[in-house]
Image (cartoon, rainbow, N blue to C red):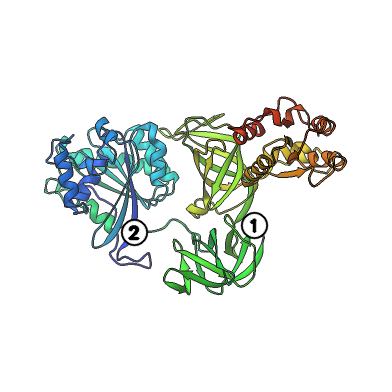
Amino acid sequence: MMRVDTLPARENNGLLPHAMDLLRFTTAGSVDDGKSTLIGRLLYDSKGIYDDQLVSIQKAGLNRSSGPIDFSLLTDGLRAEREQGITIDVAYRHFSTPRRRFIIADTPGHEQYTRNMATGASTADLAIILVDATKGLLSQSRRHTYIAALLGIPNVVVAVNKMDLCGYSQEVFEGIAADFQQLAAQLGIDNVYAIPISALQGDNVVYLSRRMSWFEGVSLLEYLETVPLRRKDSLQCVRFPIQYVIRPDSTFRGFAGQVVAGTLGRGDNVIALPSGMKTRVKRIVSFDGDLSGAAAQNAITVTLEDEIDLGRGDLLASEAFPPQAATAMQAKLVWFHSAPCEPGKFYLLKHTTSMVRARVTQIFYSVDVNTLQHLAASTLHINEIGTVRIETTLPLFFDPYRVNRTMGSFILIDPHTYATVAGGMIEQSVEIDHRLAKSSTGGVRLHERISRNGYRPAALWIVGRRSLAEELERVLFEKGWQVQLVSRAEFTAEELKSAVTILQRTGGITIYELPEEDQDLKNRIATIYGAESFYDQGRLSDNNTVTSVLKWLSSPLKTAMPN
């Protein structure tokens, strides 16, 4: 008989509370392996759907299966998906049993939607990898298993589906289970549970099957109800990214967010980052009143004993155990976007509640998820996975992904389209290459400022349009760029002429706003900045001024800037 892993104990054993805790799990596999059918059967047999939902599906006359009901329709949310006969998005469903609550992420099996699987699995505690008993392990099954391992999902169930099509053969099941165990061992997945099922017929999904009496394990649902939620995160010290500053009146100033690691208690010593200021927690406020402490995943508002200037993107951490800080990191990257990764291009990097400018400076290798081989790569295309070096313009306060998912993960965003282009997992900090700095005479050179900022020092020349100048200053400032508006209303022409060289050498963007044309001042500014870094009002259009300026500032220079 096939021996399965030892079943989890029914006691709590000091883990998360056993009664009605929450298990997040994802399903994945190759096309037509029966993921949606499995979830539909699970919901139907566990009475996790409402009668009106069932009646609606039956009345719709949509049935892709030979059974009494097409269970896959219980998770397909869009008419277009049903008409094409495929699932093309991540469908989230909630249900519960007397033992536990569940959130399911049903992800598509097509290779072009690998990024959807990564999204659905990013917060999962368990992954169900479906394998068609008539086909065995396919490349997409291996790809999804690799992503599950990459994302640090601690529990994996290999559900060998369609056992009814192979006569409920024990030999077939054991062969596939052995192949999967070998793959799991290669990927470092420790907790694997193999189970033979027929989602269509309901065998071993909610109830044990009499047609597979040789199987010694429990049903899929019972395993989901009893598997211990052994969090892989080992970080016990406090991490509290600030999301909002709450100030309803002059008597209260609180910092709202979610505890992502450790337990924060009233009176605890904490350090505020990036400022480095130390203080103590005065109050922990929740919807239900003040608390003495808050554990990970709790959303709270904190007040501090000292007046510290904090805002969104800042972090409160254990004073004794602060996170790492670096501007260069090695990370695993899953590329989501149809436009390939462009090493050297600046993206927006969102990490917890903070946003910084970052760029991929080196691609060490991409991964062939079928063979697990490392391949030389100069870019990453959609759905590809690689190990890269990423550098940020400001220090990132993080813990490695293997220690804490939240503190070690990030997304990359295109600054022009605001599309999410990649998801990343930080492995470690790496040394900054200081060769450019060492080649100088000791001071910071202009090319170093350009390299860090990601844009050239520039002058924007605007005449008679004060409101436009102020709008541009605000937009550029909100993007985190160094920008300064100077006006003839505040300075004389001679004062501005004297300041032009200094402003250009700082590496920032200066908006020169004048009530009327001053050709002499304009010529001096254009000469010092150079033609490629001088933007004349005559080149600005009324309809897309801000967009045009942003694209111009981010475009590469055709000639080298002076040092």
Q: Residues within 10 Å of mark 1 (few under 14, many from 20)?
A: some
Residue 274 numbered mark, or none? 1
The structure residue drawn at horizontal position 64% and vertical position 34%, both measured from the top left corner, is 549
Q: In the picture shown, does residue 498 fall above or below 247?
A: above
Q: Is residue 311 left or right of residue 171?
A: right
| Residue 137 in view, yes or no | yes
The image quadrant that residue 46 belongs to is: bottom left
The image quadrant that residue 507 belongs to is: top right
Q: Which element type, helix, strand or loop, lies under badge 2?
A: strand
Q: Which element type, helix, strand or loop, lies under badge 1?
A: loop
Query: Amino acid under label 1?
Result: Pro
Query: Amino acid under label 2?
Result: Leu
Residue 130 numbered mark, or none? none
Spatial CA distance of label 2 from label 1 is: 34 Å
Q: Is residue 6 left or right of residue 550?
A: left
Residue of label 2: 22
Q: How many marks?
A: 2
* Depth check, front residue: 499 or 97: 499
First in residue order: circle 2 vs circle 1 = 2
